[in-house]
Image: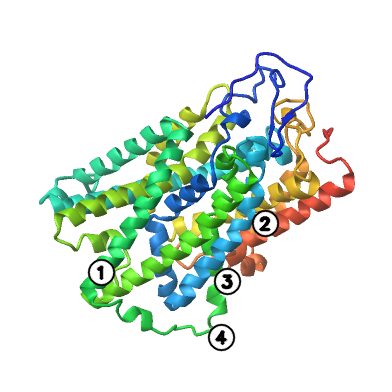
Amino acid sequence: MTATVPPAPSAEGPIGDPRGRVELPPGAVPEDSRFVNADLLPVPVAERRWTTYNFAALWIGMAHNIPSWLLASGLVTLGMDWKQAVLTIALANVIVLLPMLLTGHAGPKYGIPFPVLARASFGLRGANLPALIRAAVACAWFGIQTWIGGQGIFVLLGKIFGGWTDASRIGGQPWTLWLCFLLFWALELAIIYRGMDTLRRFENWAAPFVIVGALVLLVWITVKAGGLGPLLDQPSELGWGAEFWPVFFPSLMGMIAFWSTLSLNIPDFTRFGAGQRAQIRGQALGLPTTMTLFALLSVFVTSGSQAVYGAAVWDPVELAAKTDNVFGLVFALVTVLVATISVNIAANVVSPAYDLANLAPKRINFRTGALITGVIGVLVMPWKLTATPELYIFTWLGLVGGLLGTVAGILIADYWIVRRTVLDLADLYRPGGRYWYAGGWNPRAVAAFAVGGVLAVGGSHSLPGKGPFPEDGLIPLLKPLADYGWAVGLVAAAAVYLVLTLPSGRRGAKMVP
C-alpha cells in the first residue's frame, strides 16, 4: 500500500513510463522532511495495479447501501413520480462523475492522495484547510453509517432471537443495540487496518454479492405481490411544468452532494490505478449505472411492498424483517452487513485517514488516522445526529457540501487549466519549493475559497425551529443561491482562482509575502 521514504536527497528528476505515470526517484525527497511519511509518498508504479473491474467494483460496493436505497423515497415524498425520481438520481450521478474523473486523473499519473494534490493549489500547509473540512464530514458520516448498519443488524437479529430487542436499556437504547453498533464498528476498523489491498479484495467480492442480495429482495417481493404493485402507476404530484422545476434543481444538488466528498478524495483510490483508462472506465461503468439501477430496484421493491402490505415500505431492513424465513433473515443480515461495510470503509474511513496523516505526517500514518476516524465517529454521537436530521443531514451537511464544491473548483482549475496536469512531484513534499507560496499557504486559493464559500453557503436558511440559521438566510441577498450551493461554490471558486492566478504568469511559482 505504501512507498518507502528515500534515504537521501537527489537531484534526479521524476521517473516516467510509457503510460504517462510518474514516480519519484530514490532520494528525491529528504527523509527528515516534516511533510513526508510513507503513506503520503507516491505509490510506486509497480504497485499501481487496480484495474477497471476494481474501480467498478469499488463503486458498486459503495453505491449499494441503505441511504442510497432511500434516496428515491425522499424524492417521491417531495411529489415526484418514480420516473422523475430515477431521472434526477441518474442525472446527478452523471454530473458528479465529471469532477471525479478530473480530480482522479492525478492519482494514476502521480500516485498521490488528495491531501498531497491539494498542496499544489493551497500550499503545503494550506492543504490542511480543505483536508480537514473533508475529514470532518467523512468522520461524521462514518459514525452515521455505522449506527445505521448496527441498527439493521439489531432489527434482523431481533427476528431471529426472540427477546433481543427487549433487552434492558443503557442510555435510552437496548444494550443489544449498543453491542451491534460496537461490533460492527470494530469489524470495519479491522478490515481497513489491514490496508488498501485488503479493501480492494473485499470490494471485489462484496460488489456482486450485494447486487445478488438486492435482486433476491426484488424477486421475493414480486412473487409475494403477484406483480410490482400500484406505486409504478402513481402520477407525479408536480407534473413537468412550473411546479416541478423549483423542486427538481434543489433535489439535483442534493443528489450531487451525496457524493461530494468522493468527488474530492477519489485520488486516494485512483493513485493505485494501473492507468487512466482503468479509472475512467471503472468509474464511468460503476457510478452512474449502479446508482440508477439501485434507484430502480428501490422503486420496484417498494412498489411491491405497497401491494403486499398496503403501505410503501422504503427501508429495506424493515421490509426484510417482515419475513419469517430464518434463511431469508440470515441472508438479509449478511447483505446489510456487507453493503454497509463496503461503502463506509471506502467512502468514510480512507479519506480522513489520509487527511489526518497530512496534518502531522511524522506522528500520524494511515492506520493511525483510520483509528482516529473511528473514535471521532463514536464521539459525534451518531444516534443523536440521526434523531435530528433537520439539523445535521439537511442543514450541516448541506452547508459543508457547498464548501466541498468550492474546494473542487479550485483543485480542478489549478490542476487542469493553470498547470495543464504537470506537477513537480518532489516539490509537493519540500518546504521552500514552488508550492510553498507564502509560508506554506497560497493566498489566492484561500481568497477563492472564501469568495466561493460565502456565495455557496452565505444564503443558508432554516425553517422556524428546524435548524440554526435565520429563516431569511445568513445573508438574505444570497438565499436564492443556497439550494445550489455545490454548483455555485465550484464555479465561483474556480473563476476567482483563475482570475487571481493566470494574469500573474507565476504558475505554481513560490510567492513572497
Residue 135 as seen in the image, left or right of residue 316: right
Crowdedness of circle 3 by 10 Å Cα count: few (<14), some, many (20+)?
A: some
**Residue under pointer 3:** 249
Q: Position of residue 506 (x, y in %)?
A: 86, 40
Residue drawn where x is 52% and y is 30% of the image: 1
Q: In the rendering, which numbered label is found on residue 173?
A: none
User: Tag 3's secondary structure?
Assistant: helix
Residue drawn where x is 46% and y is 59% of the image: 290
Residue 7 against residue 422 in the figure, above or below: above
Tell me the CA gap for discs 1 and 4: 34 Å
Q: Earlier in the sequence, mark 1 or mark 4?
A: 1
Is residue 201 visible to us here?
Answer: yes
- Which amino acid type corresponds to the residue marked 1 in the rendered image? Ile
- Which amino acid type corresponds to the residue marked 3 in the rendered image? Phe
**Residue under pointer 2:** 490
Q: In the rendering, which numbered label is found on residue 221?
A: 1
